[in-house]
Image (tube, coloured by chain):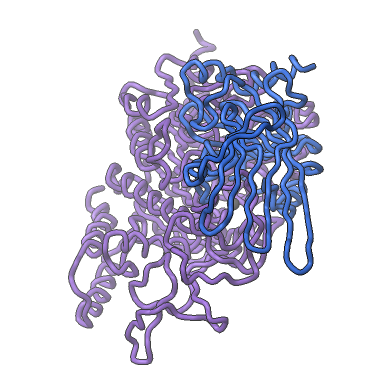
Chain colours: A purple, B blue
Amino acid sequence: MKRSTFTLSSLALAVGLSLAGSACAESPEKWYDDGARAVDQAQQLRADRHRAKNVILFVGDGMGVSTVTAARILEGQLRGAKGEENRLSFELLPYVALSKTYNTNQQTPDSAGTMTAMMTGVKSKAGVISVNQYAERGNCASTQGNELTTFLEQAEMAGMSTGVVTTARLTHATPAATYAHSPERNWESDDKLTDEAKANGCKDIARQLIEFPYGDGLEVAMGGGRRHFIPREVVDGEGKQGKRKDGRDLTAEWQEKDRNSVYVWNQAQFDAIDTEQVDHLLGLFESSHMEYAFDRPSDLGGEPSLSAMTGKAIDVLDNNEKGYFLHVESGRIDHAHHAGNAYRALTDTIEFAKAIETAMQKVDMADTLILVTADHSHVFTIAGYPTRGNPILGKVVGNDGAGNPTGVDQLAEDGMPYTTLGYTNGRGFHDLAVGGDTAYGEPINAGSRTDLSDVDTEGQGFHQEALVPLSAETHAGEDVAIYAGGPGAYLMHGVQEQNVIYHVMRKATRMDRKLRRAERERRQEERRRDDD
Amino acid sequence: MKSRLLFLALLLVGGQTAEALAQGDTPAEAGKTAAVLVAAQYETRNIQLARRPKATSHRWYLLRTPRQVATWGEGRAQRQRWQRGVTGDIALSRIFPAEHKRVDYEPGDLRTLGRYPDWRRLQGIIAPGLLGRLQPSGSVAVLGRTAERYLGQVDGVDVEVLWLADLGLPALVRQVFGDREASLHLQALYTDDEAPWGFVDTANYDHLDYADLGDMEADPFVARISRAEGGHHP
Ligand SMILES: [Zn+2]
């Protein structure tokens, strides 16, 4: 019975993949038939009301709709196609909704407040981690009574397995909001705690991961941020110092937790993990954030890709018959955008799509709800009238009056060419591959135009032009998309507040019932112990 | 005092100095020296020769070990410190002593910015291939040391370099571009425990990552240093 429903999303997946992979030439007939087939598929779509045993929440940090579109085109073009017709793995999921991302105190949000909304069902302020809007940022005392329970915590209480995977630091705002509570996202280790925070009992974020009080603790935690887990006196395997002032080595504490707890920090150790034997896996592959997908091959220490970590995480988590919750973050799309470097933002988005594809292939979509979204957008635009198939990272080459490509760079009113991709604000144009000054510190170069005639705008070192000069490019306030597939995915529709994501995960997993049962079992266990 | 500074410098390179020297792992043009620590004071001068002659100058300092290079300009609020890791990766820290803040650029962050620093150039100031494009023209004494003199033209620019081969540092670099002359002058030089200044100990500083600055727009320090961007170019 269960099998009959699962065909829908996997059908969409299969058809979508075949479409994306088809080399079939475009024609009016093909456009028409493809359009009609999409409607046929939609007609077959039935709300899958079965219970979701597992939930995977993918968050592309800063992955606004323009980022998804540009990454889709780039991925297609890297395969030799025109690109626009391409679909990223998660664009094959059958349900889409829009997510309103603002924080309770900010029109354009940050990652801490937005992930708090997704993980707790309650919108909150910018900069705070899973505490509500009554807390004041940076004020420990104000959080008392204002902590929120996260979906990950509830999954642990219900006996499910839980995991967090990111390319950012594990203690960074987005992953932190799944397992920690803090009025300040920057309290990643105890060196940043204020005297007030210490006096009022606030714990740093890394410590909260290790001392996680629900269930049997997280089964999987992988990403960067090693420095927040080791003492400052300790130099790690890659020659970097820790940050902790309390002298605690949290990686050692993790391993002492139980016999099957493992800590890994490099590619070789990651490869050697026996996912059937490991119960608790901690992977910290960089002192700070992990490398961008593009730079990963040049990382001499060696670290796994986001898709490899996602696959490994699922292999550990699916050992629990009660199911699992996994959060996967592509954390550095955001960082590349802040730096004004679309190349890395898009290549990280493509790797993110690959991680989702890995998950879609590994799990049974009949019992696993997959959600893909972003916490917020960026001021990143796809502009001008480039001809079909024009390199997405390139300069605009338009069409002539007859609608055919001119073959030459389009010139703006100032007589200079311009790129399709650009930013509304930020540091502006730089093409720094031939740098080499002994001092860093490029002046901000926004608000004026540069002649790009002789510049390779498709290179990894290119930084798009920007209008408003700011120290860093900023987040944007427009809605982001939520893509959904699997049981309960049909609940994702329309334009929704971001905190609705939590409520969909609760409903799809029947978390209320699970928690009641867990509570009953706990009481029975207590009585049994009293009787003995 | 001096021995304390040396101790500090050794501490900051994490004891890698001695090991690096033992393995002969030193940059090509800075490698013929027995000195572990080199401290130099330079002045950069710009002279406008045509019509309205104008001269500007700027004094700056360099502190170098085989794995670390720090530079800072006189009167500037920040220092740059480049570090080469055991794997050859190069990281940059911008150090703000007055605020007790340090901003770190991991090797990956530098690549995001399109920066591929050349360690030999960081250590020796001039581009590694420059001397090969000039003609050796005898030697002169500078600050009690012998400097080799190189002359020639590079890309149409007249260049003169006085090179301290034993330390792998220039004593003079002069470039004449038509109506403008830019030059770099070594004013003082110390090695090992003679060095009158040391690396800044940033252990108790507040450490920020470059990659995180974009999410710290509300932080007053981040806003201020970003506005003041421009740095110091030796
Ligand atoms: Zn951001």
Q: Is residue A186 at least partly visible in the picture?
A: no
Specify the farthest residue to the bottom: A401
Quadrant for the C terminus of chain B in the image? top right
On screen, A126 above or below A24?
A: above
Nearer to me, A18 or B172: B172
On screen, A275 above or below A399?
A: above
Residue A185, given in percent of the width and then of the height, sits at: 65, 41
Number of numbered discs: 0
Residue A303, given in percent of the width and then of the height, sits at: 41, 34
Residue A178, given in percent of the width and then of the height, sits at: 54, 39
- Report the residue at 63% width, 26% height from top: A243
Q: Quadrant of residue B171?
A: top right
- In this rendering, would A26 be left or right of A448? left
Nearer to me, B57 or A272: B57
- In this rendering, would A158 be left or right of A350? right
- Report the residue at 54% width, 56% height from top: A337
Q: Is residue B64 at least partly visible in the picture?
A: yes
Residue A320, given in percent of the width and then of the height, sits at: 36, 30
Nearer to me, B46 or B27: B46
Quadrant for the N terminus of chain B in the image? top right
Q: Quadrant of residue B178?
A: bottom right
- Report the residue at 40% width, 32% height from top: A302
